[in-house]
Each structure stands twice: as C-alpha cells, then as structure tokens.
Amino acid sequence: MSHLAIAPILIPLCAGILLLLFRYLPIQLRRGFALAVTLVQLLVASLLLIKVSDGTILSYALGNWSAPFGIVLVVDRLAAWMLLVTTLLAPFPLLHACRGTDTQGQHFHVLYQLQLMGLSGAFLTGDLFNLFVFFEVLLLASYGLILHGGGRRRTESSLHYVVLNLAGSSLFLIAVGTLYGLYGTLNMADLALKMATTPAENLGPARAAALLLFGVFALKAALVPLYLWLPRAYAHTSAPVAALFAIMTKVGAYSLLRTSTLMFGAQAGGLSWLYIPWLLPLALATLLLGLLGALAARDLREQAAYLVVASVGTLLTAFALPGSDALAAGLYYLPHSTFAAAALFLLAEAISQARGTQGDRFEPGSAMPGAAWLGGLFFALTNSCCSRRRWITPCGPGFGLLSWAAACWPSLPWPAPAACSSSAPSPMWIRT
Amino acid sequence: MTGVRPSLLGLLPALGLLSLTLAMTVGAEPVYRMVQATADQLLQPYLYIHAVLGARP
C-alpha cells in the first residue's frame, strides 16, 4: 500500500502546524517555507496523477482498517485531477499575498495551509462522514481567511458566508445521519452497492436524505437560489483569498459529480439519476443570473465574483448532461475557469491600486499609471475567459439571454466543445 | 488622484495564472484525452466500488 495517497493531506497539515509553532520567525522565512510547501504539494499531486493515469484506482485504508469498517482515501482520475488543479492554483494567490496581504492580520499562512488540507481531504476521501469532516476543516480555515484583514464591509459580508455555511453543515449532518440509519454504512462505495437494492419502503427517506445532500453541495457550489452569499463575500475579501476561493465553489461541484455518478448513477435502482432533473434547470438559471449579475456589477471585483457564479452554472450544466463527452468538457472547463477567475481577482486589485481613489468602480477617472500593462493583461485574461466558448457579442443587455440560448441550443447530448462554449464574457468597459 | 504604478513582480501571479490557461489551450489535446478518460471512468462506478471493497459481491 503506497503512502503517497495520504501525503496531500499530511503535508499541508504538518506545514500548518510548523508555521503556527514558528510564528515568531521573520516573515520572509515563513513566506519562503509556505511557498516551498505548496510546490511540494504540486509535485505530489503530479505524481498521483501519473500513478492513476493508467486507470488504476488507489485505495488507502487509514490505520489499515479495511473498508467499509475503516475510513478510506481513494485516488481515482477525478480526485487526482482536482488535486492537481488545486495545487496548480495555490502558489499564485500565495505569491500575491506575500506582497503584503499576509501581514494585515494573523496566521495567514497557517490558515492557507489548513485550507489546502481541507480541499485535498475533500477530494480524496471515500467516506461520506469524512467528507463532512474535511468540509468543516476547509470551512473553518476559510472563515479565518475571508475575514483576514478585517474592516466593516468585509466583516459584514463575510458574516453571511459564515452563517449560511453553518446552516449547510447542520443539514449535511442530518443527511449523513439519515443515510447511516437507512444503510448502516457511510463508505461511499458501500453506500452505492446498498442503494441499488433499497427496499421500496425506504425509498422515501433515502430520497429525502439524498436531496438534502444535494442542497448542501448546491450551497457550496453557489447554485441558484443558494448563490447569494458569494458575490459580496468574494468582492469584499482580500484579493489572494478571493483568488484561492475560486476553487471553493468547485468543491461543491466535485461533490455533486462524485455522488451523482457513484451513488445515484445508472445502477442505483429507485434512486437513479436523482439529481439530474434538479441540476440542469438550476445550473442554467445560475448561468443566466451570473451573467446578468456581471452586467449589473458596479465594480470589477463584484463582476469577477458574478463570473465565478456564471462559471459554476456552466460547469454544472456540463455535469448534468448525459454522456461522457459533456462530462469531459466540464472537467476541461473546470481548471480553465478557475485559473481565469483567480487571475481576474488578482488583477482587479492591481487595477484598483493603480487607479487610486476611484478603486475598481466602473466610473471614469484620470489615466492610471501602467495602463498599457494592466489593460493588456485584462484584455488577454477576458479573452482567455472567452477562448473556450462560442463568440457572443460581449456587450448589450441581451447577451446573457443569448448565451443562455447558446447553452440550451445544441440539443442533448451536447457536443464537447459546446459544453465549454458558454462561459462568461467580460464586458471590457473599465475605463483607464 | 492616481495610485501606485503596478510593478511587474506584482503582476507576476496573474501572469502565471494566465499562462496556465494559455498552456491548457495550446496543449489541449493531451489534457482533453485525460479528462475524457476521467469521464469514462466516472461513468463506470463499479470500478471505484471494486477498488475500495475488493472482490466482494
């Protein structure tokens, strides 16, 4: 049994503890250490991806308690892919934070590592209760990160995030408890086996628990109507945190994909494809509302936050469509949109600093220094957002609807490039 | 009032992320082959179940 499977959890955990222990060392040393650790995690994730690239699925029994009695970590292609995306993203916000954000509050680097630990754990675990635990780990770290630096507006908008996620966690626990009561196991593979033969009298409670789970994951993924916490929380937190949180909505999307394919797939009997009739319309509505929000945004960071919502809509639309082509397109779109959204948050801060008192609000101002650089980068980035989709006129009030129509138009099953086709165009109307 | 001129170093993280998306576009074929294999694996959940629970019925 290779111990590599648990390394993505242990490395950030140990790094976080070390950073906490040595918090009185000079900041430069701690920054260097944190960056080095994220690079090691990238290396481990790449190794894991290479290991599973021939189709093997690694199962790691914690404490050598065999499944379904003990908790397992499972590395399949999807888990390794999500790990790689997270570890590819992680060094960049950290690098940005090292330019001053990390000293605006306490324990930034500790929380950052614990956040990475929670993310890795959520992708790796093969146990539903363990998934809850890692959700809690990443949420607790995220509460600290989102409030990092403080300030009235940040505290106010982050409070929604905290309260909603606390409610979500309680619902998660209720769903997990119900499933345990019905099936006597929380190992996802074992659950999948037992769900296939759910007796008729248990179908009702099983459905209710499954849909509660759906609600929890939809809240994490910021699906309509549970996306309202996202735009303000992301717009008002610090730029590196918002950039890292571009991956947070994808944890919800990942959980939806994992449960809907493993536990509620074709073989699940009375629970087959339980999520799909909910997922598709809600994902399309999310896409539409995200785009409308991006149009109505009053500043660049708020717009970037709405683009995150729209990208979740696109992603989950791809996940809701039948067939492996749409799934593959969604999995291709996932890192692309994550990187683009993260870069947009980082750039928004640079633009807002360059514009001085106007910040990143959409209002005319005097020429900003470095306009050619910032404008060029912004242009390249918005093009990058668009590169995977059909060209839609990027301005005008109708483009949200148009893009929605483009999303629906190629009748099911969707051809692969089209599933990527409707990400969010960014109206380029910020004045330099 | 104008603000601070951005330094290249400050824009480096955004540039890095941008280059990742560009790399994904240029090297789309191997990436796409991998995500296609991922999707195929996901749609065969018995592979996952078998890997976790072993040769149980």
Image (spheres, coloured by chain):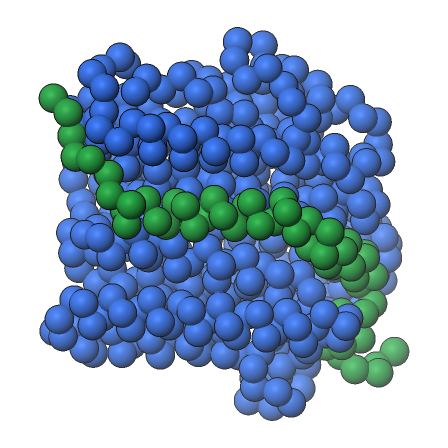
Chain colours: A blue, B green
Looking at the picture, tell me which residue is in the foreground, A83 or A180: A83
Residue A168 pos. (x, y %): 47, 48
Instruction: Look at the picture and state if A363 lies above or below A76.
Output: above
Residue A159 pos. (x, y %): 29, 41
**What residue sits 55% from the left and 62% below the top?**
A84
The quarter of the displayed image where residue A423 is located: top right
**What residue sits 26% from the left and 31% below the top?**
A370
User: How many numbered marks have been drawn onto this rendered protein structure?
Assistant: 0
Instruction: Look at the picture and state if A266 lies above or below A384.
Output: below
Looking at the picture, tell me which residue is in the foreground, A27 or A61: A27
The answer to whether residue A268 is seen in the rendering is no
Q: Is residue A14 left or right of residue A200?
A: left
Quadrant (top left, top right, bottom left, bottom right) of the N terminus of chain A: bottom right
Residue A206 pos. (x, y %): 71, 53
**What residue sits 35% from the left and 79% below the top?**
A14
Q: Is residue A135 left or right of residue A356?
A: right
Quadrant (top left, top right, bottom left, bottom right) of the C terminus of chain A: top left
